[in-house]
Amino acid sequence: MRLIFTLCTTLLAAACTEGTRAPRAARVDDFGDTLRLAASPKRIVSLNPTTTEMMFALGAGNRLVGRTTWDFYPDSARLIPDLGNGIRPNVEAVLAARPDLVVLYASADNAAAARALRSANVATLALKIDSIGDFRRALALVGLALGDSARAAAVSDSVMRSIARARNATLGNARPTVFWHMWDSPLLTIGGGSYLSELVAIAGGRNVYDSLPQPSPQIAFEDLARRDPEVILAAPEGVARILADPAWRRLKAVRTGRVLAVDTTLVFRPSVRLGEAALSLAALLHPRSRP
């Protein structure tokens, strides 16, 4: 569960919903830096599991010479040298891989690493991918960096078609209220600032905390009991703990057997499998529908 929490907080921190971030010009990343490449990169370090998935989807997995400890998909990613954490990375280890492009998660914790890499004449691309809109823009930038914008557009369109399938499959269905359990102590959920809240809505549900702007707000159990959601989504470990704790039986979802395990390896990556994630959630929330 500690791994899941680490991944969640990394992916959800400072999240924003689609349309809230002002668009930037092409080749400008989320640190405001312009991507400068003399040629299509041949040696790439991806310090974000989300962009690692993008690289493989765009046929550039063979160009990767470094990844983070958390890059598990596709299976081929495990063959890439592990350079440690993607947050506050070891710059010396990254430089030792002799990259001509490093892709980072655009968090404040990575600003110093990006500066150090650029000072060493290594191109960097910092991307904050916290919403579906962010994903599409980031994929376009990665495609531009790789010199294959057409393939990036095709992958983006495919993802959006799957998302549309999930949305269309549940149109007209009653929308159950949903609580997404993220952590126990403190009790954390997803707010309206998370792409996961977007996925719940696409899958035909309504996040009971969608009015909160934070991506992963802390809440009180008493408030949750008052909202009394019809469905609880959680990681498999979270489901087991909820069902084992008598206090949770105050909630309708527990009493009616609607505490549902999500595939965390799928839903916790706002990347090229977003469509699959939406379809999997639609199947959980509306098992009689056929996305």
Image (tube, grey):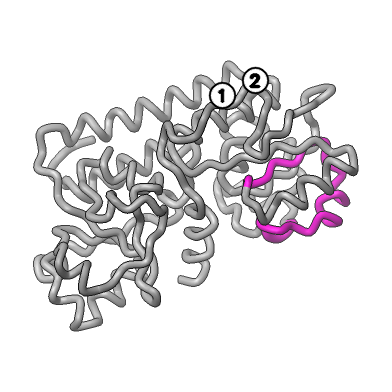
The numbered dot on residue 240 is none
Residue 262 lies, in percent from the top left, at 33, 56
Which of 1 and 116 lies nearest the eye of the viewer? 116
The quarter of the image holding the N terminus is: bottom left
Magenta range is 83-106
Disc 2 element: loop
Q: Is residue 204 magenta?
A: no
Q: Is residue 282 above or below residue 169?
A: below
Query: Based on the displayed image, in which of its 4 quarters is residue 190 positioned?
Result: bottom left
Amino acid type of disc 2? Asp
* Label tally: 2
Rendered location of residue 103, percent (x, y): 69, 41
Residue at 51% across, 55% down: 13
Q: Position of residue 179 (x, y in %)?
A: 25, 59
Assess whether mark 2 and mark 1 are in contact (beta carbons under 8 angstroms). yes
Give the residue at x 42% y 31%. 19
Residue carrying label 1: 152
Disc 1 to disc 2, how far (Cα)? 7 Å
The correct choice, above or below, for 260 with respect to 174 in the image is below
> Which element type, helix, strand or loop, lies under badge 1?
helix
In the displayed structure, does residue 176 sit left or right of residue 53?
left
Q: Residues within 10 Å of mark 1 (few under 14, many from 20)?
A: many
**Left or right of residue 93, residue 140 in this image:** left
Q: Amino acid at mark 1?
A: Ala
Q: Check residue 148 in the rendering and tell me which mark sits there, or answer none.
A: 2
* Nearer to the camera, 122 or 32: 32
What residue is drawn where x is 60% and y is 57%? 70
In the rendered view, would you say 165 is above or below 78? above
